[in-house]
Amino acid sequence: MKYLFLLGAASAALVPAAAQAQQAAPATPPAVSSDTDQQTDQRGDQHADQHGDVIVTALPFGAETPTIASRVNRNDILTSGGSSIADALANVPGISATGFAPGASRPIIRGQDATRVRVLENGSSSSDVSDIGPDHGMPIDPLSARSIEVVRGAAALRYGSQAIGGVVNVVNNRVPMTLPTRDLSGELTGAFDSVSNTGEGTALMDGRAGDIAVHADGFYRDAGDYDTPLGRQGNSFFRGYGETVGASYFFGADKDSHVGAAIEQYNAKYGIPSDTTYIDMRQTKVLTRGSFALGGGALQTLNVDGSYADYTHDEDDPDGTILTTFRNKEADGHAELVFGALGPVANSALGVEIQHRDFQALGEDSSYLFPTTTDTQAAYLFTDTPIGDALHLQASGRVEHVHVAGTPASDAFTTRDYTPLSGSVGALYNIGAAVKLGFNASSTGRAPAITELFARGGHDGPNTFETGDPTLKIERSNSLEATLRVNTSRFSFEGSLYSSWFKNYIFGQLTGRSCDDDGVCADGDSGELRELNYRQQGAWFRGVEAQAHFDIVKTDTTRFAIRALADYTRATLDGDGNVPRIPPYRAGGGFDYQSPKIDAGVLFVHSGRQDKYGAFDTPTPGYNQLTAQISLRPLSAHPGVQLSLVGQNLTNDIQRNAAALNRDDVVLPGRNIRLVLKLATF
C-alpha cells in the first residue's frame, strides 16, 4: 500500500503547482450521465466506432488514433456467454483466446498472449497470475463489465512494456466516473446455457445522493462439465461469484472533479479439462480513482488512479487436497496530467506509473517458480497535433525501469534491471468526409517476465517442465501498421495491415523431451511433463484484419445489414521454424437486423486449419462456427426488458484451439442454446 500513498502524495503536490499555471478557458463539461447501461469512463479516446460506441481506452483526450480500437458493449457480453473476457471478444477481428479451460482463457491479440497482452480493469492491473500459467484464470468476470475495449499498436504504450501486443480494458462503473441524473437505476439479468447446464445472474445498481454517486454489483455463475460432439468434456466445470461496492464524490463549480473508491471480492472454482485438478481462486481488490479539473488553459486535468489486490489460488486434487498455492500481492498506481494547446500541439498528456508485485508459490508445484519481486517505474508522453483540417499527427514515448528479483534453476538468487524505451509516430489523414487513412511506426521494448527468467520446474496444470533463462535481454518490436476506415451512410469498413519485426523475441519452446517431477528428462513421451525452455530469437509477425457492414435497409427505426470479418496472423522465427501456438486465419459473414422491438443476427465464421505449427506441436483441423440470435423487447413502455435466445456452434463441429497447449486433449463446447433475460431501468 505504501506505493499508492507515495503516488497520492506526489499527485497532491502536483495540484497546487498546476493550479498556479491555470489560465482562463471554457470549463470542462459537467460529469453527468443519464442512464446506467450507457455510463462510460469520460477519460480517454472519445472517438466512436462504426456502431456509435465510445472508445475510452486509447488516449486520455478526445482524439482518434491511427490504429483501430475495438469495443463490445453490455448486450454483446450478455449474449456471448462464457466465464472469461476472451469469450466476450470472440468475434472481434484479430482477437482469439488461449482456450485452456472455461475458467482460464486469456485474450490473444495478433498472435500475442500472456506477458504481451495486458488485461486491465478501468485502466488498472488485473493483478493476478494468469501471465504465469495458461491454467490460471483472471479474477474479472465479463458479467460485471459494462464494455470491453481492445487497443492494439502504439496506443498501448500508455500501459507499459507488458502491453507490447495490446491492451484489453474491462470498463465498469465500480468507481463511478459520472454523476447520474437519476436517484436510482439498475439492471438484473439471468441466463441459462444448455451445453453445460449453466445458471447465472447479475445485479447492478447505480444511485445518487446529492454530489455522491454510489455503485453496487454482484454476479453468480454455476456451470457443469460441458458437452462436445465427442461426448462430455471431463473436469470442465466453472463456479464463480463476486460482489463490489463503490462511491465517488463530485465537486467543483460544474461537478467536473471527483474522487472515489471501491472494494471488490471475486471467488471461483474451475476444473482443468486436460487434468484431474481444479483451481480455487479468490481476490480482494481496492480501487481508487480521482479526476481534478484544473480550470483550463495549458493544464486541463489531473487524473490519479490506483489499485491494490491480494490474490490467492489453490490447485487441488479431486478430493480437495491442496497441492499448490499461488499468491500475488500487487499495487498499481497512475498519475496523468492532460494539457490543452501548447504552441502547435493541440493536446498532450504526461503520465507516471508505479507498480510493485510480490509473487510466491507454496506446496507441490512451488519448485516451478520460487518467490519473485517486481518493481516498475515509468513515465510517458502523448501528443496530438492537427495539420490543417485533414491531417492529425501523433507522437508518443515511454521510458520504463523494471527491477526483478528471483531464484532461477541455478539456485543462485538473481536480480535483473531493465530500462526498455518505446516510441511511436503516427498520422491520420481524412480523405473527404467518409474515408480515413492511418499510418503508424513504433519501436517498443519489453522486459522479460518472471516465468521467462526464473521458471525452474514442473507445472501440473499445463503438464510442462519449464526452465527460464535469467540472462534474457530486452525484447524489441519494430512495427509498421496501415489502416483504412470508410464510413458512409450505408457502408462502414475498418481494416489493418501490420508487420512487426522482433529482436530477441522470447518464447517457450517444446524440446520434444519429457520429464518427471524431479526434472529427469529423456527423449520421447515417457515422462508426465513436456519439457519447455524459454529462449530468444528473431521473429517476424505480419497479418491483416478487417470487418465491414453494409446497410441494405436503413430507416429511422429499422436496420438490416450484412457483415463480414476476417483476420490472419503469420509468425515465423528467423532462420527457420514457426512461432508456436499461433491461431489460424478466420473468415466469415452474416446479417444483423435491428428494430425497436426485435434484434436478430446470424454469423458464420470458418477457422482454418493450422498446419504452420511450432516445433513438437501438432496441427489442428479447421472448423466452422455458426451463431444465431434473436432478442425481443415486448414492452414499448419498458425497453429495458429484453429476452434473448442465442444458438452457438449450431453445426456442432468438433473444434480444437490451435493456441492451447492442451489442444490434443480438449475439445471446445458443442451446440449450445443460450437464454438471457435482462431487466434494466432507464
Image (cartoon, rainbow, N blue to C red):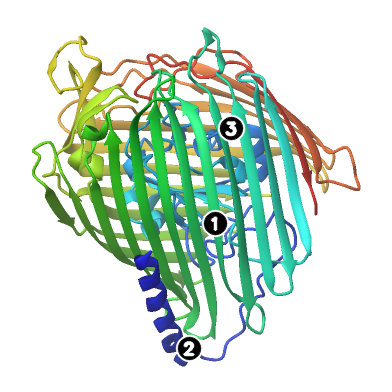
Q: Which residue is mark 1?
A: 263
Left or right of residue 208, residue 668 in this image: left
Q: Amino acid at mark 3?
A: Ala
Q: Residues within 10 Å of mark 3 (few under 14, many from 20)?
A: some
User: Is tag 2's residue or tag 1's residue first in the polypeptide sequence?
Assistant: 2
Q: Position of residue 488 (x, y in %)?
A: 65, 49
Q: Amino acid at mark 2?
A: Ala
Residue 395 picture quarter: bottom left
Q: Residues within 10 Å of mark 1 (few under 14, many from 20)?
A: many
Give me the C-alpha separation between circle 1 and circle 3: 41 Å
Circle 2/circle 1 CB separation < 8 Å = no
Residue 461 picture quarter: top left
Q: Residues within 10 Å of mark 2 (few under 14, many from 20)?
A: some
Q: Nearer the viewer, residue 382 or 86?
A: 86
Give me the C-alpha separation between circle 2 and circle 1: 31 Å
Q: Which residue is mark 3?
A: 564
Residue at 15% across, 23% down:
519
Q: Position of residue 570 (x, y in %)?
A: 33, 31
Tell us which disc is closer to us: 1 or 3.
1
Q: Which residue is mark 2?
A: 19
Under circle 3, the secondary element is strand
